[in-house]
């Protein structure tokens, strides 16, 4: 036993001298928080990386490095040549794609990201209108760390349920799923502000169309159950009954929030295919630009009816648009696959059917409360 | 009955602890990424396969216990020698020792591969192998009580990992399970078979049985241990099916570990880095039990001290872990080992039971005649 | 192994000395009957020290004693007075004459010598080869005081002191029961230290008593100055860093142990008592837990256990995360962490070791210095060095918080011995974390786990009651269940009688 112990100690010493792991000491690495991809010339990839560095001279600094190469990893090697610190991507929070890349297909990018164990599955993905490089390199007056800023911007809007979540996992999930397509927010620089303006619609990995942010609410309504959220809509003449129309000839703009929905999709006809979309929706009326008495049950009932009508029309419009661009962001294909036995669904087969698809929208809308003043 | 084991009461363990022994010997490296193999065969009915293999394991254990009960206080090695005679029995013992050693190797090598692929790409594999082997040696030389103790603490300390499966549920949808039973029976059975590598481990019962103090409680605790494993596997496959889409699941190598990467706390992110390293605690009892089982067999064949055995064994394993380096080699070993293990763990016990029962009948008839 | 060898060489030496003595002067052990030769024999044996008093009382008596060991008043009032009045003829007569409780007659020189060393007056009558030994030892001890190293808020405030007889009487005052057995032996070939083994007959397991008795008796050493050394010698594994027997200066804790079927050892001259068997978890249980309401006691216990865990693993986790696993750091921490480290020229592992070293220095200096200066040094050193180190850019301020927190946490351990262990095992874990990140930490964790599983305390498992699982004892482990649920004694000390109390509620209306 005694001998054994010494032997073990010697082995351990030996091992500790030889087998050291590669260190990644926090302040000695360049922490990439954001990467933007653009399509360059000759099938090259233009990569813009936001790298946070710390050093004794300046406490913390954000550096923007743009490189060009054939592969994304190649651009990282090149970026390392320009950086005083080793670039690591384990803290990457968001990846941006220029719209040319998005239209070209994201498959290659998502796959390299998935393959790399250092990359988190919960990083966000977004599309930039135009190229990412100018958006990132612009010197904003009020934004200190642009990587952090964009991440917070997207995260905030997704957790508040304004947008469809577009984490790497969900993007990969939708890409590999037969009956579902992905969607991502579109960012745009507007002078000194970066804003989410639209929502990109994808067919598999290629961007095929976009919807306005307001429309993305309907998209989300059809795709998921809501826990909270906010919507502004304008009730137009078609929706309103004459009793409500009296004082507002051009329509009634209204906002409701803390929306809770339960969505139920049923396949009722396999051949065409035809779906029954039933959405139960509870909401709080937040603001209404009209002199409707919200204390009057009759008027509320009329209002509910009007909103129902309005929502049904809007949802049908959004579905029709998505069918037109051939992007099944709602996941109707998933419903089809899970309800039809031995469907042997493939992407091609589904997208052929998708164009012919019919959706009967049915909405139950209840205003559960308004504010604390009637 | 030949070769019954002579055991002092100090070496024996409570039947209650068999729960932890069985459970911890089953949960090991297979759990990291069994989903894609099952999914490959059974598609979204994979959970039925998992349930099925869980039930089958219960049935197999019934046969195992019946065989062991015939001999009261003897392990598989002794039963082999008794049933098949010295030569064939020892040959079968040799195969079983080889099986245990291969299982040991497979667990060790797969865990090293995960560490290398995920956490430390540049760390020398031989360093990982040496450190893990040293820990295992330290535990092994402390005797069965300590090994069972590690199994106990490994189960208790790692229990908090399972509730974390709630995190991925946020991104899950139940539509992935439908339509239920779309795959045919053959593919579901195939899927169940591909679970072999993940669910084996309970065959340790063959060797540990004589060490149990209160044999009347063995059944209860072994079945509870198996049930716990089945429930955990079932939970993991259900969460995985709901969390991943079809194509994604088929291509994710370590789906369980990837599940952990979505876990996020205010003070820690990327939880899989913790989980992977923490998995060492789950691996160690696995390794200890296999090396112990191999040792129990080896001393039936040759007289060798535990210390000598563990050194020789570790050095051989160490060399193998360094020689086998690439992912393809490891995958090949996993599949081949899984195939062989299926026959050893799921088919052979029934055969052994039949033979042992026949032999017992014959001998008792003989005795009656005499 | 090491222990055995040590013992072996020691006993060899000893036996050599003994055989020499036996060979040369075989009759030396008998007391000479002539006064002069008796005095000479005593003087030879004691090397004629200056405090050896030889007093003759005419016509035939000689008193020999050591000056400061005997009580002078008793000597005057009860011995000298009586002897001057009625000179005795024989030792037997004298024994009946003297009004002193502890009187003995002996004819062995060794006996007389050893009892003289404990405060006995030797009375020799010319012509007799027997002496009367009158024990009138002074009890000069520190007065009883509160246990300083193990203070508690609620509960008794009396601790052991350095006198064995005082300590035994303290225990007797808690447990007024004839079943309290006290066995006295002498250990230390040269110091002749009294060691008492205490246990409750009818509760403590006989087998364990035998084991411990046998272990104490087989100790072959020339000096035992303190019980801590004795504890290390009778430990199951004296090579382990973890103590397997509890050292306490609290009388109530000691008595509590005895009443739970444990065995106690008291050593003369030491204010620390030994309790065994003791499981790992019991080192973190305070006696005070019994005095508080069970909810509060349970909370404090959980707090203590998490403190221990933090103390051991917090710094290594910091080192590992900053050196290898920057991915796990949440984004909110990323900037403050890296900015605080921006000026530090060392890798995190070195930085952490340096700070841990400074903290240990401060602690050690504080322990060595007189109390008043010690406190000042602690505050000055802590604040000055802490702030200066951060400003000079040697360490990051976040690490200072972490190190201070883990040092603080390590002091929550009720046992000082265990607290030391907690602080020391941090160092190798920090080094492992600095080399191999989380993997290194897990290596250390597994190693410590296996090591703990291997240990035993007086033959009982060290990890009890968790492993082997004794579910009933879990009620008084990490939590303290209400007394009505803990009516049985813990099984780890294998008590003969495990009923502690009647679980029926005292107040019948309540149920």
Image (tube, coloured by chain):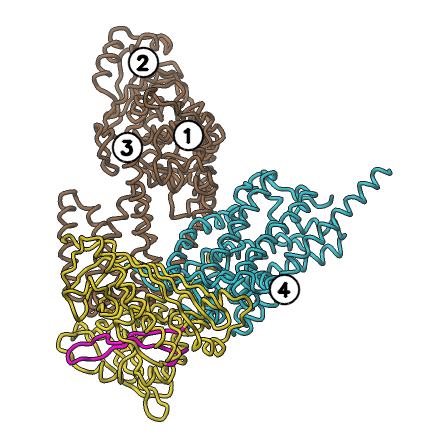
Chain colours: A yellow, B cyan, C brown
Disc number for residue B186: 4
| Disc 3: which residue | C293
Q: How far apart are labels 1 and 3 at the CA level?
A: 19 Å
Q: Main secondary structure of the magenta part?
A: strand
The answer to which of marks 1 and 3 sits earlier in the sequence is 3
Question: Which residue appears farthest toward the front when viewing the image?
Answer: A242
Which of the 4 image quarters holds residue B14? Answer: top right
Q: How far apart are labels 2 and 1 at the CA level?
A: 40 Å
Q: How far apart are labels 4 and 1 at the CA level?
A: 58 Å
Q: Are marks 1 and 3 on the same chain?
A: yes
| Span highlighted in magenta in the image | A181-206
The answer to whether any part of residue C278 appears in the image is yes
Q: Residues within 10 Å of mark 2 (few under 14, many from 20)?
A: few
- Subunit that carries the residue with mark 4: B
Nearer mark to the viewer, of 1 and 3: 3
Q: Residues within 10 Å of mark 3 (few under 14, many from 20)?
A: few
Q: Are marks 2 and 1 in contact (CB under 8 Å)?
A: no
Disc number for residue C101: 2
* Dot 1: element: loop
């Amino acid at each position: 036993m005694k001998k054994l112990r010494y032997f073990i100690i010697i082995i351990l010493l030996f091992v500790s001298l030889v087998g050291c792991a590669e260190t990644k000491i926090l302040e000695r690495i360049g922490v990439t928080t954001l990467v933007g991809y653009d399509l360059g010339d000759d099938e090259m990839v233009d990569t813009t990386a936001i790298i946070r560095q710390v050093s004794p001279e300046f406490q913390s600094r954000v550096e923007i490095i743009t490189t060009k190469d054939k592969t994304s990893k190649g651009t990282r090697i090149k970026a390392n040549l320009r950086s005083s610190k080793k670039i690591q991507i384990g803290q990457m929070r968001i990846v941006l794609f220029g719209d040319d890349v998005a239209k070209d297909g994201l498959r290659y990018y998502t796959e390299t990201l998935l393959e790399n164990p250092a990359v988190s599955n919960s990083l966000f993905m977004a599309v930039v209108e135009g190229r990412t490089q100018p958006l990132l390199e612009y010197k904003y007056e009020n934004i200190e760390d642009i990587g952090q800023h964009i991440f917070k911007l997207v995260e905030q809007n997704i957790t508040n349920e304004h947008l469809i979540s577009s984490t790497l996992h969900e993007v990969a999930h939708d890409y590999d799923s037969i009956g579902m397509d992905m969607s991502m927010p579109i960012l745009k620089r507007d002078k000194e502000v970066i804003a989410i303006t639209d929502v990109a619609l994808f067919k598999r990995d290629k961007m095929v169309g976009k919807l306005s942010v307001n429309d993305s609410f309907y998209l989300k309504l059809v795709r998921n159950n809501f826990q909270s959220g906010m919507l502004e809509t304008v009730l137009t003449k078609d929706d309103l009954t004459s009793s409500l129309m009296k004082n507002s000839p051009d329509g009634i703009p209204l906002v409701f929030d803390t929306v809770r929905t339960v969505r139920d999709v049923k396949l009722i006809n396999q051949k065409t295919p035809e779906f029954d979309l039933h959405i139960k929706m509870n909401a709080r009326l937040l603001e209404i630009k009209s002199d409707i008495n919200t204390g009057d049950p009759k008027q509320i009932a009329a209002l509910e009816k009007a909103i129902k009508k309005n929502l049904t029309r809007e949802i049908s419009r959004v579905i029709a648009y998505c069918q037109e661009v051939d992007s099944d962001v709602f996941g109707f294909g998933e419903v089809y696959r899970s309800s039809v036995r031995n469907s042997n669904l493939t992407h091609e087969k589904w997208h052929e059917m998708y164009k012919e698809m019919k959706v009967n929208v049915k909405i139950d809308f209840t205003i559960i409360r308004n504010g604390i003043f009637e | 009955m030949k070769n019954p084991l002579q055991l002092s009461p100090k070496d024996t363990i409570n039947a209650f602890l068999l729960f932890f022994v069985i459970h911890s010997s089953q949960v090991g490296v297979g759990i990291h990424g069994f989903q894609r193999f099952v999914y490959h065969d059974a598609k979204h009915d994979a959970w039925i396969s998992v349930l099925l293999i869980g039930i089958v394991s219960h049935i197999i254990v019934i046969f195992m216990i019946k065989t062991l009960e015939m001999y009261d206080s003897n392990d598989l090695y002794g039963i082999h020698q008794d049933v098949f005679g010295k030569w064939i029995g020892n040959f079968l013992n040799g195969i079983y020792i080889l099986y245990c050693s291969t299982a040991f190797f497979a667990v060790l090598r797969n865990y090293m591969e995960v560490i290398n692929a995920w956490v430390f790409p540049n760390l020398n594999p031989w360093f990982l192998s040496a450190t893990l082997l040293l820990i295992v040696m330290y535990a092994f030389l402390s005797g069965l009580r300590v090994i069972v103790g590690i199994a106990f603490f490994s189960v208790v300390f790692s229990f908090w990992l399972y509730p974390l499966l709630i995190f991925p549920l946020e991104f899950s949808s139940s539509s992935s399970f439908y339509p239920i039973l779309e795959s045919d029976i053959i593919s579901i059975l195939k899927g169940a078979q591909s679970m072999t590598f993940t669910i084996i481990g309970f065959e340790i019962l063959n060797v540990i049985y004589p060490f149990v103090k209160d044999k009347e409680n063995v059944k209860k605790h072994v079945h509870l241990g198996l049930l716990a494993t089945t429930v955990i596997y079932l939970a993991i496959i259900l969460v995985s099916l709901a969390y991943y889409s079809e194509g994604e699941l088929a291509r994710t190598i370590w789906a369980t570990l990837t599940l952990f990467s979505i876990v996020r706390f205010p003070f820690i992110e990327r939880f899989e880095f913790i989980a992977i390293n923490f998995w060492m605690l789950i691996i160690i009892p696995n390794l200890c039990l296999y090396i112990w089982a191999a040792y129990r067999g080896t001393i039936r064949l040759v007289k060798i001290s535990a210390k000598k055995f563990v050194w020789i064994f570790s050095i051989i394993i160490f060399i193998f872990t360094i020689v086998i380096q690439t992912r393809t080699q490891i995958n090949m070993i996993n599949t081949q080992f899984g195939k062989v293990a299926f026959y050893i763990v799921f088919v052979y016990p029934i055969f052994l039971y039949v033979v042992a029962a026949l032999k017992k009948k014959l001998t008792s008839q003989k005795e009656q005649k005499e | 192994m090491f222990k055995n060898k040590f013992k072996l060489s020691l006993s060899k030496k000893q036996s050599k000395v003994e055989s020499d003595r036996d060979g040369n002067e075989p009759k030396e052990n008998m007391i000479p009957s002539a006064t002069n030769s008796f005095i000479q024999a005593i003087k030879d044996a004691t090397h004629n020290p200056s405090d050896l008093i030889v007093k003759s009382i005419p016509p035939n008596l000689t008193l020999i004693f050591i000056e400061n060991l005997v009580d002078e008043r008793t000597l005057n009032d009860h011995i000298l007075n009586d002897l001057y009045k009625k000179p005795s003829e024989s030792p037997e007569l004298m024994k009946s004459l003297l009004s002193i409780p502890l009187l003995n007659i002996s004819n062995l020189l060794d006996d007389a010598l050893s009892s003289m060393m404990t405060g006995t007056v030797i009375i020799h009558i010319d012509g007799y080869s027997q002496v009367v030994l009158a024990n009138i030892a002074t009890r000069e001890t520190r007065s009883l005081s509160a246990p300083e190293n193990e203070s508690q808020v609620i509960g008794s405030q009396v601790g052991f002191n350095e006198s064995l007889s005082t300590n035994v009487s303290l225990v007797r005052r808690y447990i007024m029961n004839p079943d309290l057995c006290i066995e006295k032996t002498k250990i230390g070939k040269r110091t002749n230290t009294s060691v008492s083994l205490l246990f409750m007959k009818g509760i403590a397991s006989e087998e364990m008593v035998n084991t411990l008795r046998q272990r104490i008796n087989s100790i072959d050493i020339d000096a035992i100055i303190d019980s801590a050394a004795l504890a290390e010698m009778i430990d199951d594994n004296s090579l382990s860093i973890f103590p397997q027997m509890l050292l306490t200066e609290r009388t109530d804790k000691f008595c509590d142990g005895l009443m739970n079927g444990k065995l106690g050892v008291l050593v003369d001259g030491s204010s620390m008592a030994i309790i065994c068997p003791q499981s790992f978890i019991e080192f973190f249980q305070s006696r005070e837990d019994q005095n508080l309401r069970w909810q509060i006691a349970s909370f404090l216990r959980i707090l203590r256990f998490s403190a221990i865990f933090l103390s051991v693993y917090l710094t290594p986790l910091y080192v590992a995360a900053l050196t290898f696993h920057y991915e796990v750091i949440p984004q909110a921490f990323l900037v403050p962490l890296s900015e605080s480290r921006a000026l530090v020229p060392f890798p995190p592992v070195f930085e952490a070791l340096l700070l841990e070293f400074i903290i240990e220095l401060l602690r050690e200096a504080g322990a060595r210095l007189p109390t008043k200066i010690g406190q000042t040094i602690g505050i000055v050193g802590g604040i000055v060095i802490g702030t200066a180190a951060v400003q000079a850019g040697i360490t990051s301020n976040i690490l200072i918080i972490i190190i201070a927190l883990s040092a603080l946490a390590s002091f929550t351990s009720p046992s000082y011995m265990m607290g030391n262990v907690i602080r020391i095992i941090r160092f190798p874990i920090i080094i492992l974390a600095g080399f191999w990140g989380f993997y290194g930490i897990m290596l250390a964790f597994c190693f410590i786990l296996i090591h703990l599983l291997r240990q035993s305390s007086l033959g009982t498992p060290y990890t009890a009651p968790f492993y082997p699982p004794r579910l009933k004892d879990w009620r008084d482990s990490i939590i303290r269940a209400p007394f009505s649920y803990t009516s049985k004694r813990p099984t780890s000390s294998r008590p003969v009688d495990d009923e502690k109390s009647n679980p029926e509620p005292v107040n019948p209306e309540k149920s």
